[in-house]
Image (cartoon, rainbow, N blue to C red):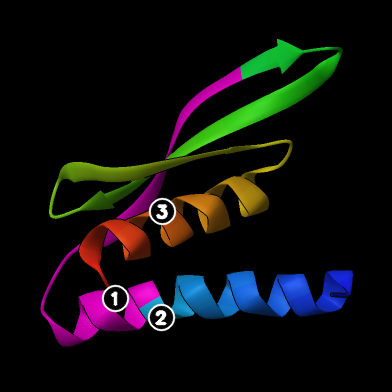
Amino acid sequence: MFVEDLESVDINLKNKLIGWASRNGKALSFELAGEKMESGRRVFTLNAVLDGEVLAQGKAFNKKDASQIAAQQAILKLGL
């Protein structure tokens, strides 16, 4: 699979979660939970927050990827 394919899959998963939340009257946000240095690189931790409760968490070397990972975990947890 090419990197472009992976990016579109991640983006579609995040959009799917946002659309689901919107259709169901849920408040969804992605919040920065932490930032630290690992092996000389910054690692960001973002939470997918649904109706004020942390639903899932993602960690990556940039905020965009961390939010996409959190969205993917949230979708799995919700069974969407």
Q: Nearer the viewer, residue 7 or 63?
A: 7
Which percent across, then down, holds residue 50?
Answer: 20, 55
Name the element at disc 1. loop
> Which portion, as a residue range, is magenta?
17-35
Q: Eyeballing the image, is 40 above or below 20?
A: above
Give the CA separation, mark 2 to mark 1.
Answer: 9 Å
Q: Earlier in the sequence, mark 2 or mark 1?
A: 2
Label 2, residues with CA under 10 Å away: few <14, some 14-19, many ≥20: some
* Residue 31 belongs to magenta span: yes
- Numbered tag placed on residue 73 in the rendering: 3
**Residue at (44%, 59%) from the top-left corner?**
71
Disc 1: which residue: 80
Give the CA separation, mark 1 to mark 3.
Answer: 10 Å
Label 3, residues with CA under 10 Å away: few <14, some 14-19, many ≥20: some
**Residue at (14%, 46%) from the top-left corner?**
52
Which percent across, then down, holds residue 7?
Answer: 73, 71
Q: Amino acid at mark 1?
A: Leu
Quadrant in which residue 80 is drawn: bottom left
Q: Is residue 58 left or right of residue 63?
A: left
